[in-house]
Image: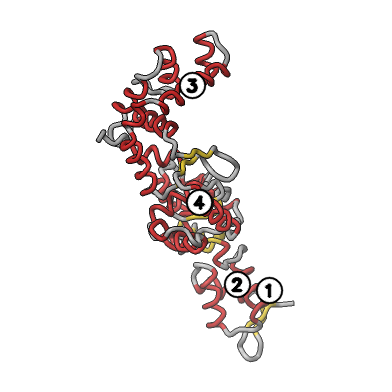
């Protein structure tokens, strides 16, 4: 039995190439990047080198593949190709091309050799990248179609701003997979590989999932990074800490002054104390302390001093005396005979 090609494919590739005429062999090597340089050449580039059309190069490539498949050598190496087939099955039966090749080898040359074997193997189906999915390989079309349908259903179920922790999202995805083989469904790593096929769904650097188009998933600037940092922290953060965390978590140099300016400009953030920011979605409102007091009184009606202070402190990180000073402003607030405060009309 020959060595499995996903361990050492070079020998198998050489045997396959040996059945080809010399020029055809050279064209295939350059087309698939099978030499030490590991640089794949386009049909046009090869055609220019040999003074032939790109279509003629394509014909030579197809001739080479068919010749190898009909050869005795190809039949002799069946066990090796079966080993590669079994590997794809173990990865979920359908897997993104980049994910598959990087899983099999870190070497670009070896990856090119493995890709060549995938092209040759009659049990491997390659699906080209489209609007929904990346390039991928499958050895079971039924599984592949079920996975694609589940990914579509999952994407539709998400709203634009949703961010979901990894394990919760894996569970959600599993619920959309229906009759897919349990050996695949129960493997979290397989499910993550399937999720990576989708161009509609993405995962940010903090391990949270959502719509691929969302800035919460594909952060594009300081404000997006700041949002993710504060959201992860879960409580008010000083802008200096936000800048520090952006650098630590994302490897992006965040200048403190720039970070502060970006937080001020973005409606996703609310200043709740001296340099302290929270997320608007947490229920905090913008404005100075006076505005916060007025909003609370308008929503709740008259409140006594202690209750009002407690509610304001949930919205702003300020000293109690700051609240009391604002309440003394008769233009904005009045104190009733029962000792409760109300907004002045």
Give the SS element for disc 2: helix
Which mark is on residue 326?
2
Q: Residues within 10 Å of mark 2 (few under 14, many from 20)?
A: some
Residue at x 54% of width, y 66% of height? 282
Mark pair 3, 2: CA separation: 85 Å
Q: Earlier in the sequence, mark 3 or mark 2?
A: 3
Neighbor class of circle 4 (other Cα within 10 Å; few <14, some 14-19, many 20+) is: few
68 and 130: which is toward the camera: 68
Above or below residue 13? Residue 92 is: below
Q: In the image, which is nearer the foreground, mark 4 or mark 1? A: 4
Is disc 3 placed on a helix, strand or loop?
A: helix
The residue at which mark 4 appears reads as 142
Badge number at residue 205: none
Q: Residue at x 46, y 50 (%)?
A: 194
Q: CA distance from mark 2 to mark 1?
A: 8 Å
Q: Nearer the viewer, residue 340 or 38?
A: 38
- Residue 305 location in percent, x, y? 56, 82
Q: Earlier in the sequence, mark 2 or mark 1?
A: 2
Q: CB atoms at circles 2 and 1 under 8 Å apart?
A: yes
**Closer to the N terminus: mark 4 or mark 1?**
4
- Identify the residue at the far bottom of this view: 338
Residue 43 placement (x, y as % from top left) = 53, 20
Q: Earlier in the sequence, mark 3 or mark 4?
A: 3
Residue with the mark numbered 1: 332
- Cα distance in 3D space between marks 3 and 1: 86 Å
Q: Earlier in the sequence, mark 3 or mark 1?
A: 3
Q: CA distance from mark 3 to mark 4?
A: 30 Å
Location of the C terminus by quadrant is: bottom right
Colouring scheme, one of rainbow, by chain, secondary structure, one colour: secondary structure
């Amino acid at each position: 039995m020959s060595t499995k090609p996903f361990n050492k494919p070079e020998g198998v590739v050489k045997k396959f190439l040996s059945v080809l005429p010399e020029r055809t062999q050279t064209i295939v090597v350059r087309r698939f990047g099978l030499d030490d340089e590991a640089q794949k050449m386009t049909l046009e580039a090869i055609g220019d080198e040999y003074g032939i059309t790109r279509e003629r190069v394509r014909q030579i490539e197809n001739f080479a593949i068919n010749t190898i498949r009909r050869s005795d050598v190809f039949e002799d190496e069946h066990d090796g190709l079966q080993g590669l087939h079994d590997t794809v099955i173990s990865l979920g039966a359908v897997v993104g091309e980049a994910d598959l090749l990087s899983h099999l080898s870190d070497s670009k040359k070896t990856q090119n050799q493995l890709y060549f074997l995938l092209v040759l193997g009659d049990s491997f189906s390659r699906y080209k990248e489209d609007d929904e999915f990346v390039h991928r390989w499958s050895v079971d079309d039924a599984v592949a179609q079920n996975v694609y349908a589940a990914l579509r259903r999952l994407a539709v179920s998400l709203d634009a701003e949703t961010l979901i922790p990894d394990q919760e999202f894996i569970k959600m995805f599993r619920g959309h997979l229906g009759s897919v083989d349990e050996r695949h469904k129960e493997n979290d790593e397989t499910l993550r590989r399937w999720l990576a096929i989708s161009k509609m769904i993405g995962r940010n650097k903090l391990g949270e999932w959502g719509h691929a188009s969302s800035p919460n998933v594909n952060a594009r600037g300081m404000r997006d990074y700041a949002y993710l940092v504060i959201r992860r922290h879960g409580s008010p953060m000083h802008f200096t800490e936000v800048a520090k965390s952006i650098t630590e978590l994302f490897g992006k140099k965040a200048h403190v002054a720039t970070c502060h300016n970006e937080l001020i400009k973005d409606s996703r953030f609310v200043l709740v104390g001296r340099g302290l920011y929270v997320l608007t979605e947490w229920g905090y409102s913008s404005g100075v302390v006076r505005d916060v007091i007025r909003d609370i009184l308008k929503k709740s009606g008259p409140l006594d001093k202690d209750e009002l202070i407690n509610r304001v402190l949930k919205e702003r990180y300020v000293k109690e005396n700051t609240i009391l000073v604002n309440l003394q402003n008769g233009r904005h607030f009045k104190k009733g005979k029962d000792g409760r405060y109300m907004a002045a009309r």
